[in-house]
Image (cartoon, rainbow, N blue to C red):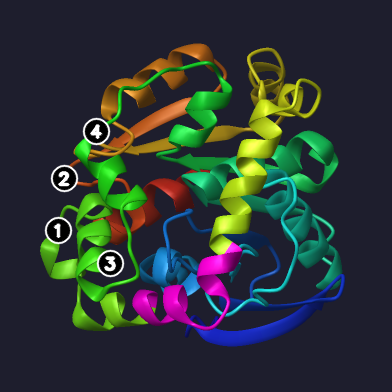
Amino acid sequence: MTENKVRSRWVLANGVRTHYSEAGDGERRVLALHGGGAGSSGASGMGPVLPLLGSDFHVLAPDSIGGFGLTDVSAPTPYGLISRAKHMADFIDALAIDRCSIIGNSQGAWAGVYYAMLHPDRVEKLVIVSSLTIAGSMGIKQAPNAAMKALMGYDGTREAMKALLEALIIDRSRITDKLVDDRQAAATRPGALEAFRRMAAGIDYVRNDPVLSLQTQWQRALPILTQKIPTLILWGKKDTFAVPETGLALAEMLPAARIEWVEGAGHQVQTDAPDASVKIIRDFLHE
C-alpha cells in the first residue's frame, strides 16, 4: 500500500536550506505550493490534502523563501515572486525531479505557472487554486475588500493571525488552535518578518520596473500555455479574498482551461473542503 503519512523533510536547494512536507511514494510527482499569507507553509497551507493525494501520488509541499514555514529566512528575494519561482526550480532540481504536476494556491499558483512558462517540458498538469495573483497578471482588477485588509494588517500578534486565517478559511472549525499557533510561530520566528518584508519589497520592485514588470504580464502567454499544458482552475464559491467573479473572469480569459467550483469553500479551498478538492484534483490528474 502507498504510504500517505505526512513526513517532514529538508533539502539544500542551491544553497538554501529548504523545509518541505511530503506524502505518498507514487511514481508521479505532484508539487503543492502554499499561498503568500504570513506564516504559511507547505504543512499549514496544503496539509489537509497531502495525505489524501498521497494515496495516489508522491506529493511534495515546500516552504517558500520569503519568511515562510521553516525554510531559511536569509535567502534573498530581490525579485519577489520571481525569486520564489526560482527557488521552486532549485527545489525541483535538488530532488532530481524530471517532470511533475503543480498545484498552487494563490501566490503559490503564480510561482507554479511562472515555472511552467520557463520549463513547459517538465510540467505535466497545472492546478490553479483561487489565485488573485494570477488574475492580476492577466489584467483582471478587483476592488480592495475586508479579507485583503486582514491579510495586509497582520501585525505579529496571535489575534491578527486568527483574523488572517478567518479571511482565508470559511469553515471556522478548520481554524484550530494548532493551526493558529503553528502559523504564528512560523511568522514570528527570528528573521521571518524581515524576510516577509523583503519579499514584499521585491514584488514592488518588479511591479515598478518597466522591463521586469513585463514578466508579470501574461495576457498573451498564459492562454497559450494552457493550450499546451492541461490546466484546472479550482475556486471556492465563498472566497471573500479572490471573489468568485474574479475566478469567472480568469476562466473566460483561459478558454483551454477548465474551472471547477467548490461549494462552501473560501480562499484556501483545500482547507475548507479537502475531500471535495482532492476528488476534483485526483480525477483531473488521472485523466
- Percent x, y of residue 7: 54, 86
Q: Please report whichever mark, 2 or 4, sits nearer to the chain's N-terminal start.
A: 4
Say which amino acid is labelled 3.
Answer: Met
Residue holding disc 3: 161
Task: Report the Cα–Cα distance between label 2 and label 4.
Answer: 19 Å
Q: Please report whichever mark, 1 or 2, sits nearer to the chain's N-terminal start.
A: 1
Say which amino acid is labelled 4.
Answer: Asn
Residue holding disc 2: 264
Do the residues under discs 1 and 2 have CB atoms within 8 angstroms? yes
Q: Nearer the viewer, mark 3 or mark 2?
A: 3
Task: Report the Cα–Cα distance between label 1 and label 2.
Answer: 8 Å
Task: Name the image quarter holding residue 94.
Answer: bottom right
Residues rendered magenta in the picture: 183-195
Residue holding disc 4: 145
Whether residue 88 is visible, yes or no, is yes
Majority secondary structure in the magenta region: helix
Say which amino acid is labelled 2.
Answer: Gly
Image point 28% across, 72% down: which residue? 157
Q: Secondary structure at mark 4?
A: loop
Do the residues under discs 2 and 4 have CB atoms within 8 angstroms? no
Point out which mark residue 268 bears: none
